[in-house]
Image (tube, rainbow, N blue to C red):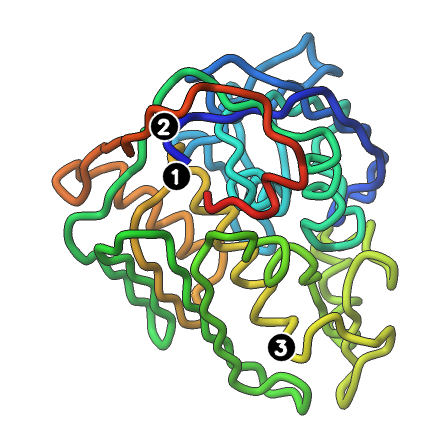
Amino acid sequence: MPFEQTIRGAVETSGVGLHSGAPVKMRILPAPAGSGILFRRVDLDNFIIEANGRNVAKVSYATSLMKKGVFISTTEHLLSALIGLGVDNAIVELDNLEVPILDGSAKPIAEMILAAGLRKQRRKRQYLRVLREVELREGDKFIAVSPWEGYSVSYSINFPHPLIGRETFEVELGNGAYMREIAPARTFGFLHEAEMMLKLGLIRGASEENAIVLTRDGVKNGPLRYKDEFVRHKVLDLIGDLALIGYQVLGRVVADRAGHAMHTALVRRLMRDSSLWEMTTLEDDEPAHDISGDEVAQRPV
């Protein structure tokens, strides 16, 4: 897609924050070309926080943004849906500090966006094309990005659980692959860790309706949507975190047990060193027009 896109009309939903447990309403609205993704805290005088690496505040079990003391938590699923569907410009209104978790995946958000449809804008989309490999390592954790003509993600995880173990999944983002292969994959957690996480002030909004709950030898609330749903969700998170680069990426990302902290560290590394990439556009003389949800699901980003 050589031109920028925004959502055709406003959509809204409500729910609770995964970690805060706080009720929250969310609206996604169209934005002018060149705006990027903007969060607007309507409960705090419409304060705006841009979705970019400069505003990353806290990464552990979720990716949070902060600007001038104003906080937004658990942004990764929403940003993943937007970048996965090729949305360049949007305003996300929230009336509380955390994006609603919904069913624990990006599917409900993506379906709302597709139902509204996308509007192709007149501004050429700027792609960040990776020019040379960058890698980060921390013990047995690893993440790297290298030159590639499209946007490819490969992720490996390794959990000592009979349903997980070592899983690897690779996807080329295009031709509707995001909706088919990634968006429905839900977040997951281990029942034996729940008490500890609650003591840390986390997962106050978690339930069997918004996360896969793993017992020591199985799933408490199956069935799974994919046999390898766990690693697919990590791909979903990675796509959302790398959206903080602020541009669609042309490159191949490979990660092994990386997590939010390493995802966002890669964003910062790229933002610090402009010799690692160049900005480019794709050539297409097709005139701007509105795009239906059905069209979006079939088009490469």
Percent coordinates x, y for residue 223 in the rendering? 83, 76
Q: Which comes sooner in the sequence, label 3 or label 1?
A: 3
Q: Amino acid at mark 2?
A: Arg
| Quarter residue 63 falls in | top right
For image coordinates 54% across by 22% down, the residue present is: 49
Q: Which mark is residue 248?
A: 1
Image check: 67 left or right of 141? right
| Quarter residue 291 falls in | top right
Q: Is residue 145 above or below residue 167?
A: above
Q: Amino acid at mark 3?
A: Asp
Secondary structure beneath dot 3 equals loop
Q: Residues within 10 Å of mark 2 (few under 14, many from 20)?
A: many
For image coordinates 65% across by 25% down, the residue present is: 92
Q: Amino acid at mark 1?
A: Gln
For image coordinates 48% across by 77% down, the residue present is: 168
The front one of 248 and 55 is: 248
Q: Nearer the viewer, mark 3 or mark 2?
A: 2
Q: Which comes sooner in the sequence, label 2 or label 1?
A: 2
Q: Which mark is residue 228?
A: 3
The front one of 59 and 253 is: 253
Where is mark 2, residue-wise? 125
Q: Residues within 10 Å of mark 3 (few under 14, many from 20)?
A: some
The front one of 3 and 217 is: 3
Percent coordinates x, y for residue 290 in the rendering? 59, 22
Q: Which comes sooner in the sequence, label 3 or label 2?
A: 2
Image check: 66 left or right of 72? left
